[in-house]
Every structure is written in structure tokens, then in C-alpha cells.
């Protein structure tokens, strides 16, 4: 009878404590209960079958830096201004003849006299820009993607796109990588110097040696400007680079790299010299009255820019944010 009683007591004790063990490990401290939860699993920072979106800003620097020294020169020979009479008249001869020069009206001369910027993409030595790229990593180490970039050339925009391949080596939160790509770029500009001659008014000469009614220019202005000439042709673009990514969380990171970009593929057409001619005349006057004239020409050599892909290579230092999914 004692054995039977002890058996029932043991079964009752097991039934009493079984629900507590079924709920997992618990700790009791007096009347309070502390439940120990298992730690969540850590994420894999760099994963296979991962999509990366990079948004970055860039500092671009040209391979060809500096400028050519183009002097301020008047390209016209001779430069006989419109409606202008030579004011240094000789004394009247026994026959009363006066001699002067006069050319046709050309109020807005603008002649390209030379290339200024050695770089033919930015129009300057360096610039800023940015871009975005999307990559898919089919393994932890290799991925492919597309990239779009834009850079602020001189008063113009240079932009393009590439297909890229990336190899990385994850190491904790860091992942050094190398990248390369092939695509296109268009836009940009080259700086040239221009000669301007503006004629804004014509009046009557007050030179006592000039015949009465002789005309001369009252508002003539000669000056030089440095202006961009835009690129209007697409060129091929190749890119190589290396960088480092740092993952702050499973899905957000920071990236920094340096790339070198080769512009090629466009047939190169050199600058050409174009001869400008403007009709003028030497006038023979008798006491301010024209009796006959001899035609003459004003001539100038104008530079007509070519196009191609030379002198357009550049580097970029890029810094941005990575979103990983």
C-alpha cells in the first residue's frame, strides 16, 4: 500500500511541473518570473543574389591640364573698318585730291583665332558631378550592373552610361573591390578665343584735313572673349577602378573609389583654317566727292574646330551610399 501511495505522489509531482518546462527555460526570483529569449540570428552582410544601388558624388580631373597661350591679335589683314576714312590725310595737292579708305558695313565680326583649353571634354582642369549605378551579385564575390554618370563641363554637360563588372572580397564589414566597364559619353566642350569687332555708329569727320562730309566710325569696339565650343558627337567610354565598401547595417553601406576613364572610338577630325574675305574699297575723293574707287579685300584666317575623342580622358574620385537588398 505504501508503494502505491508513493507512486501516485510521484506522478502528481511530474504533472505539476510539466507545463512550466513546456514553455521553455524560465528563471524565478521570489514572486517575479524572468523569461530568457534566444538571441536573433546575425545577418550576412555580403550575400549572393544581392542587389546593390549606389548613389555617389564625384570629383573629376582631366588628363590634359592647362591652357594654350593665344595672344590678343586682330586677324584681319588689312583691317579697313566699315564706313571709315583714313583721318591722316596728306595736304591738299595742286589738283585738290584727298585719299581715304572705306570698307563695307560689317557690324558684328566674330572670328575664332585659337584653341585655349588643352582638355577637350571639361573645358577646364577639373569639375564636379555625380551618378548612380545598379549591380546584381550572383555570388558574394562577383556582380554585373549598369552605371549612369554626369559631369559639369564648362557651361555644358557631359553625361554617359556604362555596363560594368565588379569583383569584391568581403572581409567582415569591409569589402575591397575592383570594377571595369564599357559604354558611351557625349557632350562637354572645348574653350576657344574669339576676336570681335563691333561697329555701332557713323559720324562726320572733324579733321580739318578731311574733305567736307567725310564719314568715320564713332563707336568702334575691338575685344576678345574665351567661349566654349560644344561637342555634339557620342564617343565610347571605358572605365577601370578600385575602391572600398563598408557596411553599417545589413542593407546600408558607404562606398569610395577612384576610376580612370578612357574616351575613344570617335574618328578624329583636326581643326581646319578657313579664310574669311570681306569686300572693301579704296576711295578717291575730290573735295569730299568720290570720283572713283579701287576694290580691296579684308582677309582673316578663322579656326573651325574639328571633333574626335583625343584629349578627353579623365579620372574620378567617387564617394557615396550603398543600399543592399
Image: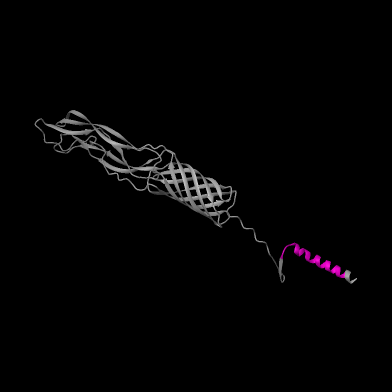
Quadrant containing the N terminus is: bottom right
Residue at figure coordinates x 83%, y 68% from the top left? 10
Residue 287 higher or lower than 143, as above or below = above
Residue at figure coordinates x 86%, y 68% from the top left? 7
Query: Colour mode?
Result: one colour
Viewer-proximal residue among 27 and 245: 245
The percent position of residue 21, horizontal first and vertical second, equals 75, 64
Viewer-proximal residue among 16 and 289: 16
The percent position of residue 162, horizontal first and vertical second, equals 49, 43
Left-right relation of 301 to 324: left
Residue 27 higher or lower than 190, as above or below = below
Left-right relation of 264 to 19: left
The percent position of residue 68, horizontal first and vertical second, equals 32, 45
Highlighted range, magenta: 5-25
Viewer-proximal residue among 66 and 85: 66
Left-right relation of 229 to 185: left
Viewer-proximal residue among 286 and 254: 254
Task: Report if residue 190 lies within the magenta region.
Answer: no
Task: Report if residue 22 lies within the magenta region.
Answer: yes
Q: How many marks?
A: 0
Amino acid at each position: 500500500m505504501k508503494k502505491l501511495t508513493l507512486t501516485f505522489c510521484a506522478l502528481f509531482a511530474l504533472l505539476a511541473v510539466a507545463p512550466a518546462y513546456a514553455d521553455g527555460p524560465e528563471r524565478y526570483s521570489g514572486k517575479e518570473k524572468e523569461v530568457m529569449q534566444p538571441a536573433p540570428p546575425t545577418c550576412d552582410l555580403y550575400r549572393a543574389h544581392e542587389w546593390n544601388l549606389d548613389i555617389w558624388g564625384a570629383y573629376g580631373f582631366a588628363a590634359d591640364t592647362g591652357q594654350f597661350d593665344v595672344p590678343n591679335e586682330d586677324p584681319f589683314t588689312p583691317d579697313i573698318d566699315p564706313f571709315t576714312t583714313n583721318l591722316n590725310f596728306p595736304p591738299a595737292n595742286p589738283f585738290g585730291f584727298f585719299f581715304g579708305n572705306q570698307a563695307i558695313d560689317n557690324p558684328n565680326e566674330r572670328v575664332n583665332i585659337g584653341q585655349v583649353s588643352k582638355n577637350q571634354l571639361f573645358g577646364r582642369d577639373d569639375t564636379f558631378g555625380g551618378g548612380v549605378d545598379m549591380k546584381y551579385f550572383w555570388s558574394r564575390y562577383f556582380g554585373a550592373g549598369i552605371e549612369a554618370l554626369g559631369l559639369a563641363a564648362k557651361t555644358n554637360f557631359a553625361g554617359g552610361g556604362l555596363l560594368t563588372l565588379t569583383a569584391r572580397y568581403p572581409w567582415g564589414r569591409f569589402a575591397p573591390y575592383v570594377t571595369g566597364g564599357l559604354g558611351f559619353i557625349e557632350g562637354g566642350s572645348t574653350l576657344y578665343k574669339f576676336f570681335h569687332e563691333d561697329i555701332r555708329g557713323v559720324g562726320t569727320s572733324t579733321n580739318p584735313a578731311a574733305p567736307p562730309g567725310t564719314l568715320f566710325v564713332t563707336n568702334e569696339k575691338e575685344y576678345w572673349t574665351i567661349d566654349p565650343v560644344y561637342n555634339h558627337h557620342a564617343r565610347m567610354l571605358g572605365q577601370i577602378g578600385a575602391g572600398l565598401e563598408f557596411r553599417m547595417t545589413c542593407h546600408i553601406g558607404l562606398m569610395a573609389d577612384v576610376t580612370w576613364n578612357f574616351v575613344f572610338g570617335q574618328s578624329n577630325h583636326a581643326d581646319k583654317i578657313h579664310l574669311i574675305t570681306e569686300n572693301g574699297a579704296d576711295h578717291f575723293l575730290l573735295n569730299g566727292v568720290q570720283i572713283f574707287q579701287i576694290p580691296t579685300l579684308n582677309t582673316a584666317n578663322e579656326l573651325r574646330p574639328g571633333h574626335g575623342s583625343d584629349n578627353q580622358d579623365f579620372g574620378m574620385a567617387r564617394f557615396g551610399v550603398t543600399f543592399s537588398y
